[in-house]
Amino acid sequence: MEIQQSISFSAQLKDDNDITFVNFNGSVDEFAVPSVSYYISNQETYRANSSLFRTSFMEFQNAVFDAADAKEAELAEE
């Protein structure tokens, strides 16, 4: 049996009124390859908070890519 391992990430971005307007998803596969996506669920709230979205998306991407870097270092040690 071959077991494949991955690391998953998810987050929801909310505005000051606690309204969710973006869902982020990310993963790092067993070969340290990252994947990141987002879904804007409320366009009106997104437009009012696009700067917050950009900052948050960069933070989310950094978390996923940091995990990919750590996985890559782990693989190099094997």
Image (spheres, rainbow, N blue to C red):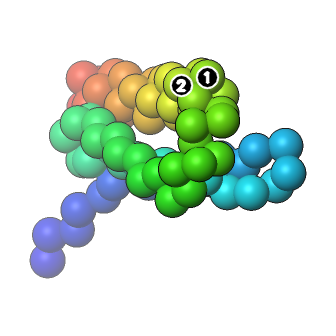
Question: Which amino acid type corresponds to the residue marked 2 in the rendered image?
Answer: Arg
**In the rendering, at what x and y percent does residue 62 appear?**
49, 24
Local crowd size for mark 1, using a 10 Å CA cut-off: few (<14), some (14–19), many (≥20): few
User: Marks 2 and 1, how far apart in space?
Assistant: 5 Å
Which quarter of the picture shows residue 61?
top left
Identify the residue shown where x is 33% and y is 54%: 6
Point out the image quarter for the C terminus: top left
Pick whichever, 9 or 56, lies toward us: 56
**How many marks do you count on the picture?**
2
Pick whichever, 59 or 45, lies toward us: 45
Residue lying farthest to the bottom in this orientation: 1
Pick whichever, 32 or 51, lies toward us: 51
Identify the residue shown where x is 85% and y is 51%: 17
Q: Which residue carries the number 1 mark?
A: 51
User: Does residue 52 lie above or below 33 as drawn?
Assistant: above
Q: Is residue 8 visible?
A: yes
Relative placement, left or right, of 34 versus 64 is left
Q: Which residue carries the number 2 mark?
A: 54
Which disc is residue 33 wearing?
A: none
